[in-house]
Amino acid sequence: MTTTEQPDPFGTSMRAFRVPSGPRAGFWIRFVAMTLDGLVLLVPFMVTAVATGVSTGRTVFWLLFMAYFTLLEGGPSGQSLGKRACGIRVVDLLTGEPIGRGRALIRALGRLVSFVVFLLGYLWMVVDREKQTWHDKMARSVVVPVRG
């Protein structure tokens, strides 16, 4: 689908939010990517938990979680290992460009919010016109097919 361009009050143009601005990754492919990422993160957690105790393992897991998603999704490809395996990536909602590490950190923190409220933040994409989760909305990002 295409979007229309509308001028903003400052004289630049921005995409309208009435229709999706391109193809979006669906729920199930994002679920598979998230599961793969979870498995990637589970291995270091298990090793650390066995070696140092569950408490330290949890701390290492959350630090690794934040670094993993911030560095990979904030990089030029916009892909975690799970997203790469599934052929999807994270991009800016309006430009389609990479979101950068700052917004990727916001997105990673937003994942916790999406998770804590009974997974509602993740499920939100099922009813959202742009197929955005809460953490996508927080970072002004969308997940798209690589070939899209």
Image (tube, rainbow, N blue to C red):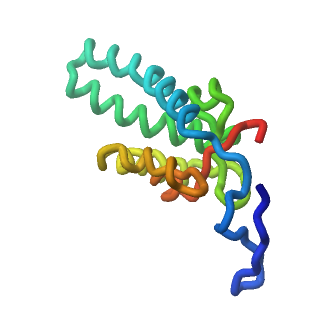
Residue sitting nearer the eye, 31 or 104: 31
Question: Number of marks in the image?
Answer: 0
Residue 48 shown left or right of residue 135 in the figure: left
For image coordinates 34% across by 21% down, the residue present is 45
The residue at the point 65 percent across, 39 percent down is 89
Residue 95 x %, y %: 73, 58
Residue 102: tell me if it is visible: no
From this view, report whether residue 11 is shown above or below residue 91: below
In the picture as drawn, the residue positioned furthest to the bottom comes out as 9
Q: Position of residue 136 (x, y in %)?
A: 52, 52
> Where is residue 14 drawn, in percent x and y?
72, 71
Quarter of the N terminus within the rendering: bottom right
Is 67 or 31 nearer to us in this picture?
31
Q: Is residue 40 above or below residue 111?
A: above
Q: Residue at x 54, y 48 (%)?
A: 104
What residue is drawn where x is 59% and y is 40%? Answer: 26
Q: Quadrant of the C terminus?
A: top right
Q: Is residue 28 left or right of residue 115?
A: right
Which of the 4 quarters of the picture holds residue 49? top left
Q: Is residue 1 visible?
A: yes
Against 141, residue 43 (above or below) is above
